[in-house]
Image (cartoon, grey):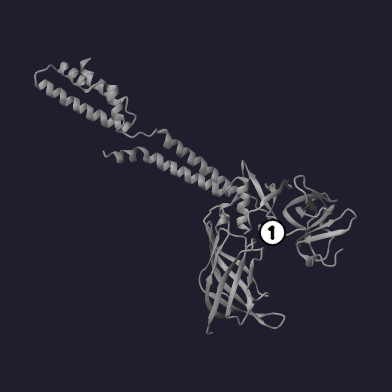
Amino acid sequence: MALFVLERYCDAVCAHIRSKAGRRETYRELRDHLDDHVQALTDRGIPLDVARERAVAAMGDPAEVGKALDKLYPYCPPALPAACTVLTVAVLLAAWSFQMRDERLSERFLWPDYRSPSQGEVLLSTGTARGGGKLGPYTFTPAGTAELVERPDAVREDGTPLAQLRVPLTITWAQPWLDEPELYDNAPFAVEGDPEAYGYWSTDTLTPLSATGELLFTVAEDVQSDTLLIHDQTGNTLRISVILPREVTP
Amino acid sequence: MNYRLRVLKAWGPAVLSALLLVFSLFLLWAVTDFPLPREATLRRLEDQALLPHGTTLASGTVELEPFAEKTPRFTWTLRGDGEQTWVLLTEAFSPLSRPYPSYGYRSVQAKSTPFWGELLELQSFSVFSSISDGAPETDWATQFCLLAYTDDPAVARVEAWAGWQEEPGKLDGLAAGTLTPAEDGEGIWTGILTQNPSPSGSLVWRVRAYDAAGNLLYEDCSNPERFVSLP
């Protein structure tokens, strides 16, 4: 019927617009435009039915109009975000179950435990540490103040009193799949010029891309400067220079 | 409405959900310890051990006694750079692989030939034995997987001991046996020994290589001081 000419035309145009918001907006604007055109024609004395037919004809082929207007409204298939969301939930559930079973991710984090203040520990001197560098993919950087701590009753065979040298260190790496470097059983530590000195690494905190801790060396108590060496198993060596000028006043 | 706003409104939810999907896939990858193609996993293990990137000399798969929902199943890979050799442990995460978490954070050490040995993994499990008054008794047993490598063709036999040693210098009570040549690779000897029952004590192991005439050629062990004065 002529009553629905405008509506049928707008529906035919909007059928070619994929975006729901686009269809809504286009229908409203198209309908307003057609109403204005019909009004203008009826004001000139043209019968309403004829005016509607003429207004629709003036707009052109509804398929072509619809396709042209479709380009103005970006379209995203509604199934896409829904599918991504469902997949995300499934993947997160799988990740949770793997973590509950293997607990591998939690092993990459270590937070410092509360440490009670050391009882009876005597700080002999403090100083600075410089140097470091890269071994493989790992970057070693001194961080903080080096300390020389008394070790009561610890002496070498020749009677030299011993102390513990503590050098805070930060190790960083860029690849998230790497764990912290193996610095435990490989004994990669040495002190230049002191073959009897020995050391080990103590991790304080651990994240997927960094580790902080201390290099702990047993050295002669009267040491004032030392060069610490960290070797890898390819023959490369890092040097960390420690200078201990400041004696701590008890 | 501005065209850019329309694009944002139309594609925004899809882009956001896609980003969340990518993040969740990365999280899954991290939670499963970053499985990678096998060569990449081996290189990762070498980086962590501050080793050079070697070439694969041989590999084999081992499965130990299942216990408490854990079945140790791993692949050992012998790698080398022409001067040193070392062994890495991985496990399949089909179709990729990832590091295998063996006992006590076993560290990877490069070693030089002519002969060396290594304890790759151990698995403790309970065993039941009935006693005369009918009440079953539970004991602990331990399986040890050992590997030895040599580039000396004179080695004809490799014997191994492993276990929890109550006192230094005490060999009886340790698991003992002969390692067998690996199918894939020359000079590689592997084997699984079982100590039953397993007492409490220090974990020790020893491997010895003999020639065809039975002469002892080489020896390697975990703690030399715990094998002093033993034949």
Name the quarter where the N terminus of chain B is drawn.
Answer: top left
Point out residue B140 in the picture as x, y percentages from the top left corner.
76, 54
Relative vertical location of residue A125 with respect to residue B103 in this rendering, above or below: below
Residue B202 falls in image quadrant? bottom right
Q: Is residue A81 left or right of residue B63?
A: left
Which residue lies under the disc numbered 1?
A: B110
Residue closest to the eye, B53 or B177: B53
| Residue A90 at x, y percent in the picture | 51, 40
Determine whether, in the image, residue B52 is placed left or right of residue A171. right
Q: Quadrant of the C terminus of chain B?
A: bottom right
* Mark 1, other Cα within 10 Å: few <14 / some 14–19 / many ≥20: many
| Amino acid beneath label 1 | Ala
The residue shown at (62%, 47%) is B39
- Residue A243 against residue A208 in the figure, above or below: below
Residue drawn 78% across the image and 65% down it: B224
Q: Residue at x 17, y 16 (%)?
A: A49
Q: Is residue A143 visible?
A: yes
- Looking at the rendered structure, the secondary structure element under dot 1 is loop
Q: Residue at x 15, y 22 (%)?
A: A38
Please state the chain letter of the residue tagged with numbered disc 1 in the rendered image: B
Q: Is residue B125 above or below residue A123?
A: above
User: Where on the picture, by quarter, is residue B149?
Assistant: bottom right
Residue that protrudes farthest toward the front in the picture: B82
